[in-house]
């Protein structure tokens, strides 16, 4: 399954279906746009016109069924024909207006007849009260923009996944560089302890038992080796990197798990830095922290 980002955008429009009466007036259009950004949970915001208020529960169910995390905003708008455009009344509508005028004048003979402006105003008012049922169109458009949003999130997730795998490879390389440095540092430090032991023996001029002082020097060297040994941290770090790779190849909802593993990587890198007894190990630890921080910033965008 793909890895999904939490950021994405999609939009779509569709005109209303034609009514029973033909008209040259431009049909109304329904437009939907959906956008999402990263969030620790699913946060939905629906901005709907009055004509679509009744669809809010259905739209929420549709979104929650396919989205798990992210701050998602769904905005809908109905665009009617221009208010300043002259209406094109149909013969049926003109006949209805004429019939109403005759009925009124039959009861009120003194009533003045309708002017052309009056007729156009009545036609515009009749056509502005759109009885279009947008339910079907809105749900179909919602399905469409949601599909496009998931596709956009999948494309972004693929790019993030590739970047994370690249950082994982770089961290593995740094871990491989750190592993052979520890025995070298331990050997150097052991040699220093032995040199100090010889110097101490020369200064003591035989007042100290050589066996006891040598054992003490070796014990100090051993304790130092244990204190600076980062083999355990490197092993755990490689194990976390294996799990990160497995999750990225598995896909689906991996954001929270990856976020936890990034925290563990940070902990191991900090421990390696605190145990560092050589400049090269310190540099490796700093480079690891930089890479892990880059990974942390991108993992926060994954669903």
Image (tube, rainbow, N blue to C red):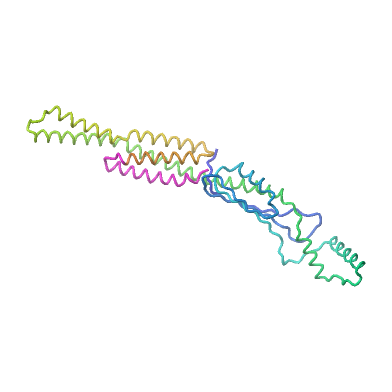
The picture quadrant where one finds residue 77 is bottom right
Classify residue 184 as left or right of residue 139. Answer: left
* Residue at x-position 60% and y-position 47%: 148
Residue sitting nearer the eye, 67 or 178: 67
User: In the picture shown, does residue 215 fall above or below 128?
Assistant: above
Q: Whole-percent x and y of residue 159?
A: 50, 45
Q: How many marks?
A: 0
Residue 97 location in percent, x, y?
85, 64
Asked if the stretch drawn in magenta spans residue 219, the answer is: no
Task: Name the main secondary structure of what is drawn in magenta.
Answer: helix
Pick the residue in front: 111 or 193. Answer: 111
The span picked out in magenta is 274-303
Placement of the N terminus among the 4 image quadrants? top right
Q: In screen coordinates, is 203 left or right of 285? A: left
Q: Is residue 285 magenta?
A: yes
Give the farthest residue toward the front.
107
Q: Position of residue 59 (x, y in %)?
A: 65, 47
User: In the shown orientation, is residue 79 left or right of residue 104?
Assistant: left
Q: For the point 80% across and 65% down, which residue is it?
A: 122
x, y (%) of residue 262? 43, 41
Q: Residue furthest top?
A: 211
Residue placed furthest toward the left: 205
């Amino acid at each position: 399954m793909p890895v999904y980002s939490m950021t994405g955008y999609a939009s779509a429009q569709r005109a209303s279906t034609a009514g029973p009466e033909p008209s040259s007036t431009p049909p109304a259009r329904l437009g939907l746009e959906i956008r999402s950004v990263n969030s620790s949970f699913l946060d939905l915001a629906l901005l709907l016109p009055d004509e679509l208020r009744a669809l809010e529960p259905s739209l929420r169910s549709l979104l929650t069924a396919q989205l798990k995390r992210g701050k998602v905003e769904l905005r809908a708008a109905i665009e009617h024909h221009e208010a300043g455009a002259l209406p094109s009344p149909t013969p049926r509508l003109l006949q209805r207006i004429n019939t109403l005028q005759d009925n009124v004048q039959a009861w009120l003979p003194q009533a003045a007849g309708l002017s052309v402006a009056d007729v156009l105003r009545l036609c515009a008012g009749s056509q502005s009260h759109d009885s279009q049922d947008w339910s079907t169109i809105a749900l179909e458009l919602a399905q469409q923009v949601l599909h496009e949003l998931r596709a956009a999130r999948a494309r972004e997730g693929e790019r993030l996944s590739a970047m994370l795998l690249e950082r994982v490879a770089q961290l593995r390389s740094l871990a491989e560089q750190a592993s052979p440095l520890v025995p070298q540092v331990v050997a150097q430090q052991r040699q220093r302890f032995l040199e100090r032991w010889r110097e101490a023996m020369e200064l003591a001029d035989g007042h100290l038992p050589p066996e006891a002082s040598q054992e003490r020097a070796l014990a100090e060297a051993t304790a130092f080796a244990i204190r600076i040994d980062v083999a355990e941290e490197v092993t755990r770090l490689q194990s976390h990197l294996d799990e990160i790779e497995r999750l990225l190849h598995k896909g689906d909802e991996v954001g929270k798990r990856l976020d936890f593993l990034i925290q563990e990587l940070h902990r191991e890198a900090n421990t390696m830095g605190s145990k560092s007894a050589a400049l090269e190990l310190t540099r490796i630890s700093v480079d690891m922290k930089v890479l892990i921080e880059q990974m942390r910033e991108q993992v926060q965008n994954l669903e």
